[in-house]
Image: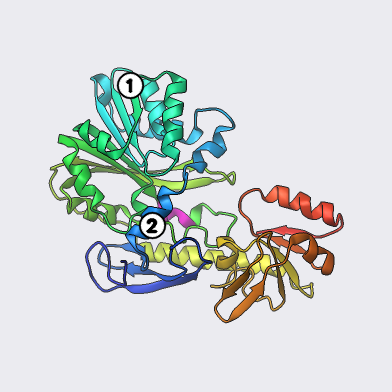
Amino acid sequence: MRNEQCPLCGSETESFLRLRFKAKMKLPTEFSVRHCALDNFLFVAAGDSQDYDEYYESLANDSYHTELAAGNLHSPIAILQKSQLVKRLPGFFDQPRKVFDFGCGEASLLLELAGAFDASTFRGFDPSPAAELGGKKAQAFGLDNLHVSDLETATANGPYDLIIVSHVLEHLLDFDLLLLLNTLLNENGLLYVEVPNPLAYSTQERREFLYYFDRLHVNHFTPQAVVRLASKYGFGYVLHFEYVFPYRDGGDYPAQGIFFQKGGGLTEISSRSILAAAQEYLSQERARAKSVAHQFNSYDGILVWGAGDNFFRSMENGGPLSGLPTLGILDRCPQTIRIGDRQFVARQPHEGIRSHPWPVVITVSEGRQALVEEVKRIDPARVVFCI
């Protein structure tokens, strides 16, 4: 169970931000994002590993690849990832290699690597239903050198020359996975870790308020923090780099890749302050939210369509809905929503729109254009905002 002590070093930490969300399986609904100065690291101070495991096992969580593939089995993100990897491993695939991707999702990256290096063998594992889709993709491409399997089979087929852990560590409450991965590497084998880059959150604005802070991304790593963590499990730092990949909202997502070698010596590196970067992002988001909220001031009230994570974030911490006294909530799922001492009863969209002349603010992240069109079908003259 996560608590207020740093999960990397066990030291005392300070709260940076408090967030609340609606109930979703057994995930935490209220928590603080805390800062460890010693490790230059931010983390969510709540949650149980078993509850998170159950959540991910029930979820096909690779949509950011498939949304951009536009019906093509090739993901633009994976193509970019592959080029970043290969560029920093000159000559690595000149000889046959064994590669394992832990948390492969739909195996989008492995598809690109296996297609480019047919003399090497590639294996993927993911705890979610996305893994089954990855296996089907490999079959569709006729890639005999790519297999998506369960963890037991992947372990039995080791050791590996390269292990990839892409956008996994930011979701882990404990890090004993790194101990397993160390045992699956050949001597002097390489570990590649890719995680979001929190030092660049303020440079890559998302349409949702405080998007980068939620209960799924429970770790926000600087390179300094990842290196400290990996060194505890027998990995020596080799190099790191930053890049961005195209995201579903049309912008770019900030990422960082770090290479380690099994058995390498301890190397301390320093990174820019994550607390300063997070404070800059928070200040920037509040200023943007203030500008958005200014559009609502001339109305007696507003109707908000959607009561998910974006709605909850927008209601607090200076978000665009936080200062509005009169709100009506629209949602197809009848429910009572509580945020602190405020309570709302969600109404069916058509009922709420016909009962109130207020503008509709759509907080749903996915499929929002379809919701705009639905509002217009109910009332063609209705003013609609998307936040």
Q: Residues within 10 Å of mark 1 (few under 14, many from 20)?
A: some
Name the quadrant containing residue 125. Answer: top left
Q: Nearer the viewer, mark 2 or mark 1?
A: 2
Q: Amino acid under label 1?
A: Asn
Residue numbers of the magenta segment: 197-201
User: On the rendered structure, is 377 left or right of 223?
Assistant: right
Q: In the rendering, at what x and y percent does residue 374 appear?
A: 77, 51
Q: Is residue 335 depicted above or below 184 in this figure?
A: below
Residue 237 in view in this figure: no
Cα distance between the residues tagged 2 and 1? 32 Å
Numbered disc 1: secondary structure: loop
Residue 93 in view in this figure: yes
The total number of labels drawn is 2
Q: Provide the residue designation for mark 1.
A: 145
Q: Provide the residue designation for mark 2.
A: 52
Name the quadrant containing residue 127. Answer: top left
**Residue 324 on the magenta segment:** no
Task: Locate the N terminus and report the quarter of the image it occupies.
Answer: bottom left
User: On the rendered structure, is 333 left or right of 27?
Assistant: right
Numbered disc 2: secondary structure: helix
Q: In the rendering, at what x and y percent does residue 258 appear?
A: 30, 44
User: On the rendered structure, is 209 left or right of 346?
Assistant: left
- Residue at the spot 78% in from the left edge and 55% down from the top edge: 375
